Amino acid sequence: MKSIHHPDRKDFMLPAVLHALSDPIRLNMVAQMHRSGEQACKNFDVPIANSTRSQHIRTLRESGIIYTRFEGTKRLLSLRTEDLNERFPGLIDSILNVYENE
Amino acid sequence: MKSIHHPDRKDFMLPAVLHALSDPIRLNMVAQMHRSGEQACKNFDVPIANSTRSQHIRTLRESGIIYTRFEGTKRLLSLRTEDLNERFPGLIDSILNVYENE
């Protein structure tokens, strides 16, 4: 099984999390996970090439925002909601609330 | 008197605001204005060259986060708190609250 690095909650950095959320495509993906829970990578409704999507997923994962797991050939992504809320109380909800009202 | 462009509140973009706040120096400057109100540009306690500081100030101004005015030879900077709160309710407080608790 593939294994990839996920940062510990204590190592999340606010600037890196804000940077990860400062791109419209990444914000869109995070909002989809927030609304619908864990998503297969291929199911994201974003108009970009696979390689670009992979880069965005990496940025989200390395900042601590998402968790990636593999199931067979599928890559499944979910928000690390509990870790984010523990480390940065109220932050992700505040940003997504603004995003959803745009 | 010098005149520089400030975007209208309605033209603020969430990704641009998050990008502007995704840099530790810029976050630090925003937190200083949040704590102490309008500041003379030269008074910011950040360990960077003047040219770099000017670039950071421009990024903050163009995203809508700060207002710049000139008084003689001084450049004075303040947060556009009312505009930000109207456009993105709760966002800047949430981010600065997390920042101050880091």
Image: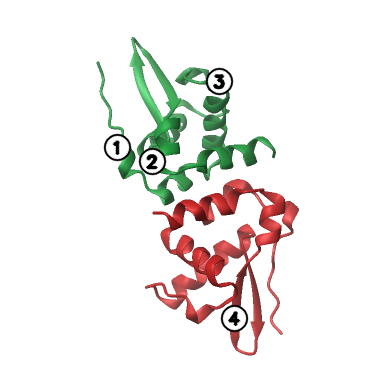
Chain colours: A red, B green
- Vertical placement of B66 versus B14: above or below? above
Residue at the image point whose x is 69% and y is 68% from the top: A5
Asked whether the residues under the numbered discs 1 and 2 touch, taking CB atoms below 8 Å apart as contact, a structural biologist would say no
Identified by mark 3, the residue type is Ser
Spatial CA distance of label 4 from label 2 is 35 Å
- Residue lying farthest top? B72
As helix, strand or loop, the secondary structure at mark 3 comes to helix
Q: What residue type is labelled 4?
A: Arg
Q: How many labels does the image show?
A: 4
Q: Which residue is drawn at 70% across and 60% down?
A: A82
Task: Report which residue position mark 2 lands on.
Answer: B63
| Residue farthest to the bottom, as pictured | A72
Quadrant containing the N terminus of chain A in the rendered view: bottom right
Residue B40 is situated, as x and y percent measured from the top left of the image, at 46, 17
Residue under label 1: B8
Q: In which quarter of the image is residue B7?
A: top left
Same-chain status of marks 4 and 2: no
User: Disc 2 to disc 3, how far (Cα)?
Assistant: 21 Å
Where, by quadrant of the figure, is residue B94 drawn? top right
| Residue underneath mark 3 | B36
Left or right: B84 in relation to A20: left
Q: Mark 4 points at which residue?
A: A75
Give how far apart the Cα atoms at labels 1 and 2 are.
10 Å
Q: Mark 3 lies on which chain?
A: B
